[in-house]
Image (cartoon, rainbow, N blue to C red):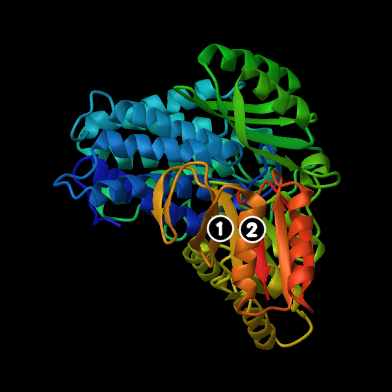
Amino acid sequence: MAQVPQTFFDALAVRTWCGLALETLGRAREEIDAINVYPVADGDTGTNLYLTVESAVAAVEAVFAGHAAASGPDGPTLADAARAMAHGALIGARGNSGTILAQLLRGMAQVLAEDDPAHADGQGLRLALRQAADSARRAVAHPVEGTVLTVASAAADAADGARGDCGTVARAAYDGARAALAATPGQLPVLERAGVVDAGGRGLVAVLGALVETFTGERARGVAGSAYPNPSEGRVAPAADRAPGDGVLDECADGPAAVPGQEGPAFEVIYLLEAGDEAVERLRERLDALGDSLVVVGGDGLWNVHVHVDDAGAAVEAGIEAGRPHRIRITHFGAGDVHTTGAERPPRERAQRAVVAVVPGEGLAGLYTEAGATTVLARPGEPPASGELVQAVRRAHAREVVLLPNDAELRHTAAAAAEQVRTEGIRVALIPTRSAVQGIAALAVHEPDRRFDEDVVSMTSAAGATRYAEVTVAERQSWTMAGICQAGDVLGLIDGDVAVIGVDVAETAETVLDRMLSAGGEMVTLVLGDDVPEAVADHLEGRVREGYLAVDTVVYRGGRQGALLLIGVE
């Protein structure tokens, strides 16, 4: 991360702010989750904000890395960094709060990138904060006061009255946001009843605190390990004990606050949508009639759509009619949970041990789940972020966790997730599996009743003894270990390197399998993607049966897993 303070709002300041915001939300995430009661008491606002900013950070870092790789004398411009921040937040936005934060960042980027200036001063920051607040309010179908929208508007109002450099404007915005946050229980009855401030607004205070630190070098008061003045300031005193407008706050307990009588739709639906402005306007009207908590953010042909509905299928169909939806996420709040009954979830006992695995397709996700693992789905071209792995570990709710990344490129992401959850007292062992078939082998010998170290050693040995391969289609011409391939060629990769270039899936897979079995083996695992017919599996099973005595074969359907075929040999 760049050194602070930053004098002007330039590309380096964008990078610094994003990094500091992620750190601050990481410290405050659990506290924010614990006071999340509006619009749904599902305890994930802090996590959603963290994941949204994590995606923004990744996009900004990619821009800096791209300029560094080009070996040019200059780094990215302010416009480059601001647009990357906004785009990263847009495509990674999670939940109601994350979607609104993405629009806040987009609004700022629209001002910061206008006319491609070298940097912005205090006046530019004031204009950016005003555009952020106004554009976020327009993106919400039915704005409600006492929420993050109120906090954002208060920050912009306070910044409007500030004169000076970026540090002065940022501090004014932060102080205005803090004051507005303390007043949210008096504006929204659900917060008043629960005795909490708005969770989304509290997260925005954390992000603005990081902005103060970016330009002053000093951590804003109240953000040392918390998104608000101190960790005890998440809950307000009961209404009976508090004078009107009193901002005195009480101790923050663990878990989402109970909100008696709160009810709502059963599903949260989120997707990215490629569509034109007119189609999106029609989509807003249709989704508004289907449910509530509607937020549509974005522009220039790419939008992030968030809505709570009872008919998730209808919400997705509306997106299909408007354009091309992708990265569709549907969350069922669940009968009897805090969303539908207002009752707080009873605490459940932690399991002693769990396995968390990243899997490349729905079919394998089902297989791993049947074997007792908690899964994280990695869709083609959409690797999970460390925050998603952290969420999965928490969802497993165990004292000890074995983490299977199942992808060589996810090893560092998984390591970061493991490091984070260890600070929460969870014992985590990362087994560096590089393919889902290695994960299958590890899971097959998993015994939760034996000592943790012994179980990890056994699973690691089983994964290490499994050679892995995949058959896929080349997307472009390129040099490989096996020669030059053309777009459309069938590639056979063994242990991550291209070993075979062919034109037929079955023939290429057979060549790969023969090469792998030439070194011996007792078990062959085949995982077929959606586009591979059963005849390919039958052909390969016959080849093993005829050519390799005492070698067994097991076949699974992997679903939309990216590769046409995964092969494991133990």
Q: Which residue is pictured at 85% across the width and 44% down the height?
A: 335
Amino acid type at mark 2: Ala
Q: Which of marks 1 and 2 is nearer the N terminus?
A: 1
Nearest to the observer: residue 430 or residue 466: 466
Residue 33 seen in this snapshot: yes
Left or right placement of residue 135 versus residue 330 in this view? left
Q: How crowded is mark 1: few (under 14 residues within 10 Å), some or many (20 or more)?
A: many
Nearest to the observer: residue 217 or residue 296: 296
Tag of residue 509 = 2
Q: Quadrant of the N terminus?
A: bottom left
Against 326, residue 251 (above or below) is below
Residue under numbered circle 1: 492
Task: Indicate the secondary structure of the residue bearing disc 1.
Answer: strand
Amino acid type at mark 1: Gly
Q: Residue 90 at what x, y percent from top left? A: 49, 36
Locate residue 518: give its quadrant: bottom right
In the rendered structure, are the residues bearing label 1 and label 2 in contact, judged by CB atoms less than 8 Å apart? yes
Q: Which residue is pictured at 25% across the width and 37% down the height?
A: 78
Extreme front residue here? 546
Left or right placement of residue 398 versus residue 468 in this view? right
Q: Residue 26 at what x, y percent from top left? A: 49, 57
Left or right placement of residue 257 versus residue 235 in this view? right
Against 319, residue 480 (above or below) is below
Against 375, residue 429 (above or below) is below
Nearest to the observer: residue 546 or residue 449: 546
Extreme left residue here? 73
Q: Residues within 10 Å of mark 2 (few under 14, many from 20)?
A: many
